[in-house]
Structure formats: structure tokens, C-alpha cells
């Protein structure tokens, strides 16, 4: 089959590109090598075609672990298609999703390593569906994290692409999962309801943020001198469609979106002891994975200062037009307003961490049962885990 032959011939090139990308630390860094995918030079030479890779999943409460999976998947090829499982399938196979399909699709689409989304994909990856991916969507490789993905009958969900050499594995990002975030939100909800949460249940985030990870997620470019810099700041906790929309609006107002991710202490002081759900480094990674953000200030102060505006040559500061955010009675954006740099933009989605926590608490029994099951399998995974190199 010509299709299989072309894909097989390109394996080496794809891997080499991936490694170059990883070394250069950026999503487009591998593009320095535009070597053709076939060596024939006569007219009959196969046309250059990008290597299409495919990853699917639920991407519920999309987090930086998912984003890192997509980053690694994208580095295995030239074009990444992502299949998002529908709500009914998730409910049937895993239990209720926290975010509905529209929210999950939006979160995946907003990820800067994603080139296209296929909606409504089955949870159980059948051979027929895999063949459709190969034929209709011209997928070369199916990619998944190195955690086992089993069908209800216990068989490997990706047995078919593995058998025919069209499967690649990426390293799952440890220390973060939907289960973990749901657990943190359940504890927040329980505390808010006045319940006592046992110390051993209130585990801290285990994810280790390295400088390499931040570099991989970032643009590695810094703020260009002549760019119209738009500054937008906030907690960006449990990244959601409201955050995505705010960053999208920021992007339309300039050339470079600089995002101030408020320090943990700042968020705690403003919102209460249960906040933030994710720490400032975790929140910064989620923001950096968004295609509308160019750079982050990790642990930014809430108050806009002269120093901040000058250092980053900020031309516009935007904030949503809801309640003004004040510290010590002073609007945090007052200085930007005084300088004529301040613009209020509409809040188009009513999303909040508490809103997400509320959804979970409304279905508390189901989420607790699901988390208990998942926590057991996650513990088994961590007990058995082996080193897998990242792309
Ligand atoms: N993934 C990952 N690292 C994580 C979480 C997920 O690499 N910390 C990868 C999975 O291996 C999969 C893709 O992201 O290839 C989509 O995952 P998803 O279907 O959303 O489900 P889970 O693996 O269950 O993710 P989570 O535990 O976060 O729900």
C-alpha cells in the first residue's frame, strides 16, 4: 500500500525532527530542517506530505499534563490532529465529565500544538475507527501516553496501530491528572461546606516544574522591542474557556500578549485559604500552552506598577468588565488607567474555580467513586512506572 510505504519511509525523518525540536525547546524549532520526505528527485517522486499524528482523549479539566502530551505528540510529526471523546462516551466508560464536550473541544483547540480537532470520537478505539483515521484523515501515527489504555474487556486499546507499526508512545506527565485536580476541588468543596479534611487527603501538588519544561512551553523569544505589548493578569486557576476567551481578546489588541500569573500568596489573600487549586508554576504552564499567550510573568503582583509597565514596554492593559479588583482600596489597574493604557473587555463566559468545584460537589458521590477507582489505578501506575524518554 502506497500510503503505508510513504509513512514507513518517513519514520527516521520524523524522529530526527522531533529530537531537533526538543533540543531547540520550541514547537516550531524543528522547522529549520525542511528536508523533503523522499529522496527521489524525478517527476514521479512522491509529493511531500506532512506526517500527520493523532492523539485522542477526554481532556477533562484540560491541564498542563494534557498540554505536554499534545506537545510531545506534535513533535512526533508535522501536523497534530486530536480526537475528543464525547460526553456520553465518557459518562459510559469513566463516569461524569467535569467539563462538557464544547468546553473540552475549546480547550484542546486553544492549545498551541494542536492543528485540528476531530469531535465525537469513540472512547473505545476500534480497528474500523483506526482505519478511518488512516484513510480519511491521512493519519500516519497514533500517539498515546505510556499509561496503559485498556478496553472494558481488558485488551489494549491501541493493539491494532501497534501491530502494524503505526503507534508511538510519549511520556505521561507525572504529578498531574484530572483525578488529581478533581480531588483538589473535592477537598476545596468539602472545606467550603465546613467539613474537616483529613491531612493525608490534602496532598500537595507533586509535579516538579523544571526550567526545561518552562522553556518547552514558552516561545523562547522574550518581548520583541517593537511589539505592541498587551498585559493581562489574574490567577488563571484551573484554566478554562473564560481564561481562553480573555487571552483571545488580548491577542486582538496587540502583537504580544504578556500574562501576569498572580503569586500563590496573592491569590490566597484575595480568594481565601483554599485557593489557588493549582500553584503558580502549574497555572503558568497552562497559560503558556494557550496559543493566545506569548509570555508569562510567574508570580506576578496584583498591583500594576510603573516598573512592570516600563520593564515590559506595556501598551495596553486589559481586564474583564466585572467587579474592579482592589488591594488596600486601590484598583489594581489604577496606574494603567491613569496612563490611558487601560481597557475593559466583556466577560463572555461565566466560569470560575468555584463554579467548577460546585459542579463536582453537585455530583459528589459519583466523582468520589470515580476518583477512588482512578486513584487506585494511578497508584498502581506509579508503583510500576519505568523511565520513558520524552520526545
Ligand atoms: N496524559 C498525559 N499526562 C497526564 C494526563 C494525560 O500525558 N498527566 C495523556 C494521556 O496519556 C492521553 C492524553 O493525555 O494520551 C489524553 O488523556 P485523557 O484521555 O484525558 O485521560 P487520562 O489519561 O485519564 O488523563 P487524566 O488522568 O488527566 O484524566
Image: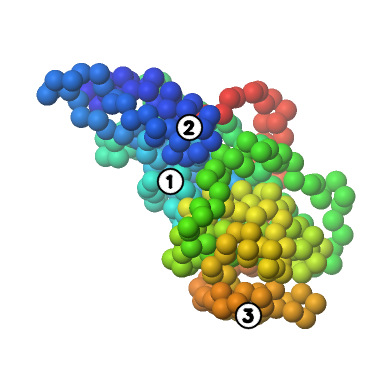
Whole-angstrom CA distance, mark 1 to mark 3, is 39 Å
Q: Residue at x 39, y 49 (%)?
A: 117
**Residue designated by label 1:** 114
Check the image and report above or below for 165 versus 82. Answer: above
Q: Residues within 10 Å of mark 3 (few under 14, many from 20)?
A: few
Q: Residue at x 69, y 41 (%)?
A: 209
Label 1 element class? loop
Check the image and report above or below for 138 versus 257. Answer: above
The furthest residue to the left: 43
Q: Earlier in the sequence, mark 2 or mark 3?
A: 2
Q: Earlier in the sequence, mark 1 or mark 2?
A: 2
Q: Are marks 2 and 3 in contact (CB under 8 Å)?
A: no
Label 3 element class? helix
Q: Residue at x 25, y 18 (%)?
A: 39
Residue labelled 3 has its Cβ within 8 Å of some atom of ligand 1: no
Q: How crowded is mark 1: few (under 14 residues within 10 Å), some or many (20 or more)?
A: many
Whether residue 39 is visible, yes or no, is yes
Q: Residue at x 70, y 68 (%)?
A: 305
Whole-angstrom CA distance, mark 2 to mark 3, is 44 Å
Residue labelled 1 has its Cβ within 8 Å of some atom of ligand 1: no
Q: Earlier in the sequence, mark 1 or mark 3?
A: 1
Q: Do the residues labelled 1 and 2 touch (CB within 8 Å)?
A: no
Q: Residue 338 carries which label?
A: 3
**Residue designated by label 2:** 21
Q: Residue 282 at x, y = what percent?
A: 67, 49
Q: In this view, does 82 lie to the left or right of 26?
A: left
Q: Residue 106 at x, y = what percent?
A: 46, 57
Label 2 element class? helix
Whole-angstrom CA distance, mark 1 to mark 2, is 16 Å
Q: Residue 243 at x, y = what percent?
A: 56, 63
Total number of numbered labels? 3
Look at the image and tell me in which quarter the N terminus lies.
top left
Amino acid at each position: 500500500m502506497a500510503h503505508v510505504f510513504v509513512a514507513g519511509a518517513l519514520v527516521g525523518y520524523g524522529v530526527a525532527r522531533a529530537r531537533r525540536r526538543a533540543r531547540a525547546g520550541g514547537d516550531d524549532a524543528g522547522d529549520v530542517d525542511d528536508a523533503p520526505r523522499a529522496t527521489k528527485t524525478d517527476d514521479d517522486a512522491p509529493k511531500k506530505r506532512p506526517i500527520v499524528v493523532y492523539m485522542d482523549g477526554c481532556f477533562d479539566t484540560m491541564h498542563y499534563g494534557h498540554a505536554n502530551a499534545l506537545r510531545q505528540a506534535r513533535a512526533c510529526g508535522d501536523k497534530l490532529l486530536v480526537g475528543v471523546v464525547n460526553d456520553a462516551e465518557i459518562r459510559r466508560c469513566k463516569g461524569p465529565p467535569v467539563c462538557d464536550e464544547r468546553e473540552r473541544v475549546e480547550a484542546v483547540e486553544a492549545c498551541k500544538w494542536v492543528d485540528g480537532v476531530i469531535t465525537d470520537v469513540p472512547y473505545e478505539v476500534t480497528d474500523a475507527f483506526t482505519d478511518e483515521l488512516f484513510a480519511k484523515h491521512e493519519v500516519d501515527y497514533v500517539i498515546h501516553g505510556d499509561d496503559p489504555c485498556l478496553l472494558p474487556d481488558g485488551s489494549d486499546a491501541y493493539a491494532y496501530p501497534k501491530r502494524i507499526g503505526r503507534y508511538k508512545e510519549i511520556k505521561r506527565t507525572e504529578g498531574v491528572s484530572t483525578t488529581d485536580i478533581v480531588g483538589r476541588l473535592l477537598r476545596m468543596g468539602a472545606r467550603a461546606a465546613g467539613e474537616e479534611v483529613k491531612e493525608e487527603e490534602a496532598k500537595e501538588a507533586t509535579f516538579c516544574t523544571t526550567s526545561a519544561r518552562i522553556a518547552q512551553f514558552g516561545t523562547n523569544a522574550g518581548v520583541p522591542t517593537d511589539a505592541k505589548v498587551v498585559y493581562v493578569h489574574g490567577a488563571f486557576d484551573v484554566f478554562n474557556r473564560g481564561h481562553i476567551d480573555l487571552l483571545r481578546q488580548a491577542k486582538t489588541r496587540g502583537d504580544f500578549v504578556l500574562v501576569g500569573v498572580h503569586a500563590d500568596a496573592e491569590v490566597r489573600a484575595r480568594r481565601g485559604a483554599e485557593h489557588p487549586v493549582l500553584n503558580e508554576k502549574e497555572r503558568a504552564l497552562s497559560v503558556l500552552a494557550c496559543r493566545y499567550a506569548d509570555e508569562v510573568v510567574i508570580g506576578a503582583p496584583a498591583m500594576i506598577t510603573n516598573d512592570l509597565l516600563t520593564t515590559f514596554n506595556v501598551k495596553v492593559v486589559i481586564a474583564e468588565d466585572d467587579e474592579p479588583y482592589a488591594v488596600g482600596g486601590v484598583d489594581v489597574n489604577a496606574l494603567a488607567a491613569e496612563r490611558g493604557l487601560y481597557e475593559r473587555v466583556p466577560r463572555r463566559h461565566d466560569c470560575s474555580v468555584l463554579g467548577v468545584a460546585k459542579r463536582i460537589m453537585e455530583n459528589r458521590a459519583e466523582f468520589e467513586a470515580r476518583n477512588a477507582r482512578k486513584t487506585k489505578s494511578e497508584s498502581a501506575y506509579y508503583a510500576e512506572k519505568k523511565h520513558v524518554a520524552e520526545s
